[in-house]
Each structure stands twice: as structure tokens, then as C-alpha cells.
Image (cartoon, rainbow, N blue to C red):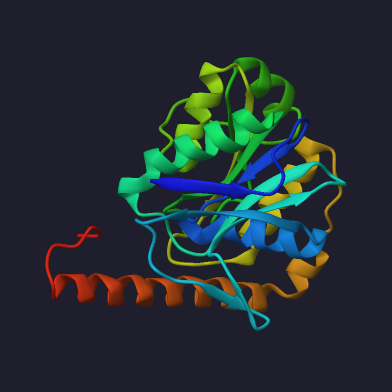
Amino acid sequence: MIEIKMQKKNLDGYTFIEGFPGAGLVGPMAINYLVEKLGMENIGYLESDKFPPLISIHDDVPMHPVRIYISEKLKLVTIFAEFAIPIEMTFELSNAVYSDIIKKGGVDRVVSISGIPTQQEEVPKDVFGVASSKKLVKDVIEKNGLKPIGDGMATGVNALILGMAMNDNMDDINILVPINPALIDPEYAVLAIKSMNSILGVDIDTAELDKEAKLVESKVKDIMKKTKETHETYKKSLDDTGPSMYA
């Protein structure tokens, strides 16, 4: 079971930005930058008995590894997760986030950020988009310079939330950045944020992300490495005593 604990319940008029860990870690890099750049406020967290048993420590302060942040000024709400969500929890997590944060909170629209792997030798600089209605494709995706994906398939948290938003006639836009699956490159996050700026009509400067690219890359890699090691250690300890819920 996933519990969502938030101090602020009313998110009327807010945009929910989703970027759970996935291909190229585009989402976490973009979300981490937004949180730090905008000084977003930590208003809650997600917890579950199925999450790896860990607490993050930042600047000497213990923090929950899946945290909810808001910017009241820009009316943005987002979740930053410091570990990859186990695949068997994808539906439960998506449903909890959609029903308890997006729908109950009165969120206005959803913007998802993720990467799409490409096998091309040179990764294209084009950013692609998927939306919950044909009108959004025409009025938002195409008008803001993103390329619509005519045919294909979406997977993961963003795909499930997109389906729920579509059923409720809610605006949901997916920003999809082509990535080299062998690399974690902050330039992917720069492209995503620039597209988000255009879509939301905001002006979040990416200059610091460009300047601190290596630092951001190292930080995200370190986060994922530590949580992977914790997950594997925990799984081994369970294997030693019986069946593992992570098997």
C-alpha cells in the first residue's frame, strides 16, 4: 500500500510535473534542477512497505526518498524520487498519485518528462510530445515546436497517468527527449526544461544546468547507485531468510 502524506491539500490551478526515474534519468535530472533552482518547498512524501528501506540524508538532514515539492509562485507541484520504482508497483503508484494528488488536489494539468531511447549514432535534438487529446497535440505539442508521435506505445508511470487523464478529459502533455541509453547526459534535461518553459509560459533559466552539467550528472548517478546497492543488499538479506518481495 502507498501512503501519500501532504501538508497542502488544495492544489487548485497547479500544474503537476511528473518525472519518475526512467530511460536516461531525464525526469529526475529535470525535477532535481527545478526543485533547487526554484527553491521549491517540500510539502510531503510517499511511503510504502514495498519501497526499499532507506532514508536519504542531504546537508546532514534525513529526508524521505520520495518527496513532494511545490512552487506557490509558479503554481507547480512535483515529486522527486531517489530510486527507480519497482515495476510491480507501477500501477499502484500511478493510481495513488493520480487520485490523491492530481484529482483530489484539483490539479489543472499534468506535464510528464521522460526519455525515449534511440539507436541512432547521433542522438537527434528534436523533442517529441504526446498529449491526452488531439486538440492538445495541435494547440500545444505542435505550436511549441515538439514533434507529435503519430504511432507508437508509451509505458511506465507517465503512460498510466496519461490514460487516466484522458478518461477524465484532463490536459496531460508528455515531453519525450531522445536519449542514448548508454549515457546520462544533463543536456537531455536542458531540452526537457526548455520545452516545458514553452508549454507552460514560464522562464526557468537552464544556464546553471549547462554550467554544472558534470556535477548534476554525478549527483544523479550517485543517488541511483546508492539506492541500487541498498535495494540489492536488502533483497539478499531477504533471500537468506526466505522469499523476497523484490524477486
Whether 101 is drawn above or below 51: the answer is above
Whether 46 is drawn above or below 130: the answer is below
Residue 91 sits in quarter: top left
Q: Which of the pair 103/21 is nearer the observer?
A: 103
Please name the residue shown 65% across and 56% down the image. 31
Please name the residue shown 79% across and 63% down the image. 37
Location of residue 8 in the rendering, given as x and y in whole percent from the top left corner: 72, 44
Location of residue 75 in the rendering, given as x and y in whole percent from the top left corner: 80, 41
Quadrant (top left, top right, bottom left, bottom right) of the C terminus: bottom left
Residue 137 sits in quarter: top right
Relative to 59, 131 lies left or right: left
Q: Is residue 232 visible from the viewing direction of this image?
A: yes
Location of residue 22 in the rendering, given as x and y in whole percent from the top left corner: 46, 54
Please name the residue shown 69% across and 39% down the image. 9
Q: Is residue 173 visible from the viewing direction of this image?
A: no
Q: Which of the pair 169/238 is nearer the observer?
A: 238
Relative to 1, 140 lies left or right: right
